[in-house]
Amino acid sequence: MSVFPKRTLPGGQVTIHCAAEVGRIVAEYGFPLLKVTVTDPTGKMSVVLERQLLGVAATPPGPPRSEVPLLAAVARLEPSDSAGQGAALTDLLETIRSGVHHYAVHTLPADAPLGRYTFTIELWADGRRIASQTAATDCFFVEKVSLRGVHSADGMSTATVRNNGPEPVPARLVSLPCGEEPLSVHDVELPPATEHHLRVAPCCSYLLYSEQREVLALFDTTTHLLRNQRISTVRRDGSTYLVDHDHGQVFELSETAEALWRAADGTLRADALGAEVEHAYELLRETGCLLEVPFT
């Protein structure tokens, strides 16, 4: 049927959605068995859902009461041709009326093998096996990308990243503005089980993958500073204050501290700071107002 997310990391979770239209497969009533099995890239199988259902052929009058999750509905309308969309829409509307929606959560171990996982949805009734209509695409991917190094020469920087898994990984390369270089965003595909060289900005670039949820910094993250996003800035009577909502504290900024605070946008390097801002830097860092960029 559908799975969310479609791409994840070792140690992550996926939720498998299936609509059991049991009213269609019983004469009057019955107790079909629903079974969902996940198979990893090594062939190991795990039963993530197995339960007996009650199916009744008759439906009460009036509008349907079932609810279909929005993402599940979108997944059912994937065909690009109008005829395919029409058939999918008809099937979806029937599912809304007669289907019962089930969810199986599968937790992956931290050492889960990388690659393509398949899941099988079966409905059994009186010895008959009814398979999922989307069986050909019932799968998800477990992936991991790592930074192998960054090389700089002649004013250009190249990051070497490795796709550690056996399947291609779609990713997005984001280079933040640096000097005269503007913001740059473009999509890449990382070949399986190999290293890939990416031209990156001298300041800092990021690689987004696993449906853009995972952020991999393509630079030394220990030297880049970022404003704590849970701290608010308040301007009053010519002075600037930082409000720490977590600890109920308020800090008044000097001109030097305010300039440093505003410059800490994720591209500011701590090792590039001058001696004149050292005191302000230490205070902002000790109070948690400035953070090191955490993406690794």
Image (tube, rainbow, N blue to C red):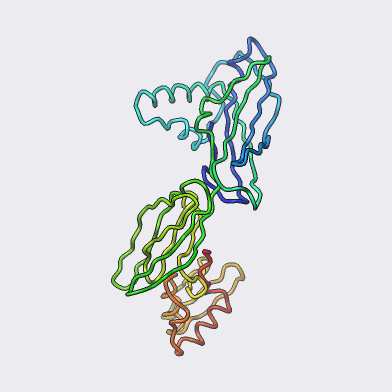
Residue positioned 47% across, 64% down in the render: 217
* Relative height, residue 61 to residue 236 (above, below): above
Question: Foreground residue, 242 or 202?
Answer: 202
Q: Position of residue 64 (x, y in %)?
A: 54, 23
Q: Quadrant of the N terminus?
A: top right
Q: How many circles with numbers are drawn on the protein?
A: 0
Q: Which quarter of the picture shows residue 265?
A: bottom left
Residue drawn at x 60%, y 13% is 58
Q: Is residue 161 left or right of residue 8?
A: left
- As rendered, which of 76 and 198 lies closer to the eye? 198
Q: At 53% across and 64% down in the image, what residue appears? A: 296
Expressed as whole percent of the image width and height from the top left, the position of residue 249 reads 58, 74
Measured as percent of width and height from the top left, residue 19 is found at 57, 27
Q: Residue furthest top?
A: 27
Q: Quadrant of residue 246?
A: bottom right
Figure check: 122 above or below 158: above
291 relative to 53, above or below: below
Q: Observer-nearest residue: 35 or 247?
A: 35
Left or right: 61 in relation to 205? right
Q: Residue 228 at x, y = what percent?
A: 52, 69
Q: Single out the residue that lies furthest toward the bottom.
A: 275
Left or right side of 286 for 29? right
Spot the residue most to the left.
180
